[in-house]
Image (cartoon, rainbow, N blue to C red):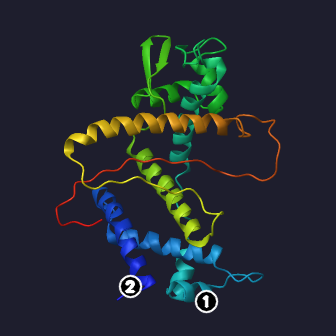
Amino acid sequence: MQKSKHQVLAAAIGRILKPLIRILLRNGISYGTFADIAKSQFIDVARNEFSIEGRKQSVSRVSVITGLTRKEVRRVAGRNPSEEHETAERYNRAARVVAGWRRDADFLDQKGKPMLLSISGNSNSFQELVRRYSGDVPYRAVLDELEGDGSVERLDENRVKLTQRAYLPKADESMKLHILGVDTALLIDTIDHNLKADHPFTRFQRKVLYDNLPDEALPEFRRLSSKAAQKLLEKFDTWLSHQDRDTRPGIQGSGRNMTGIGIYYFEKPLSDREED
């Protein structure tokens, strides 16, 4: 018998939640806290995205849509939600500095590679790089953060070199968890769009997957996929940087949009009976 849409969706939610719950439990987040967060998001989405056109969304309608009581809707809606602006800004700041070092001609050598930079003092120093791509944040704070994550290596008292082609926080757990929220939300947004849209208005969403590989094949594929994916992302990064008003203030056009491409590697051992 064919499964109903709700049954299929429930199974999909279960798959999404399993790795998320693993992260929650590892970080001391209880079911009660998770349920409270979910409740808040149900109310927020119902209030802002499921209103009747031309009419203000009411507490009663939010209650009907979400299945929560009107008292609960009022209670949750009256809170001041905690924000993670500081973590997000720290991540974006570090990523902008690394990206600027890779593509700004003032910080590249004659071969187009990131130069060794003096920490301070001249027009193409690390201090100037931070000023250009991170505003008035103290450059030594950014240097400490990048050095702690292994993105930058200090050669001596006044010279540093870039050691990573992209910024990936390694030391700061809060930044890694910030990426969890941002990247997962973007992927699910794309899937949600594709569930509603018809060709040619769907967004690119593909993967390549084989499920009977020996252990010995994995290290080489990790290396191959990492190298090819990084090269592709750098190509897209160069193109987008030429269209973005933050890096090129003279760009004209209407609206303000965010776009990009995300690539992720996955692997898991399968038992002989497991179906995925």
Counting from the top left corner in percent of width and height, residue 39 is at: 47, 75
Counting from the top left corner in percent of width and height, residue 37 is at: 45, 69
Q: Is residue 34 left or right of residue 206?
A: left
Counting from the top left corner in percent of width and height, residue 63 is at: 56, 87
Marks 1 and 2: CB-CB under 8 Å? Answer: no
Looking at numbered disc 1 in the image, what kind of residue is underneath it? Ser
Residue that badge 2 annotates: 3
User: Where on the picture, by quarter, is residue 269?
Assistant: bottom left
Which residue is at 18% across, 67% downward? 273
User: Does the image show residue 167?
Assistant: no
Foreground residue among 275 and 144: 275
Q: Residues within 10 Å of mark 1 (few under 14, many from 20)?
A: some
Q: CA distance from mark 1 to mark 2?
A: 32 Å
Residue that badge 1 annotates: 60
Marks 1, 2: nearer the viewer: 2
Looking at numbered disc 2 in the image, what kind of residue is underneath it? Lys
Mark sitting on residue 93 = none
Outermost residue to the left: 272
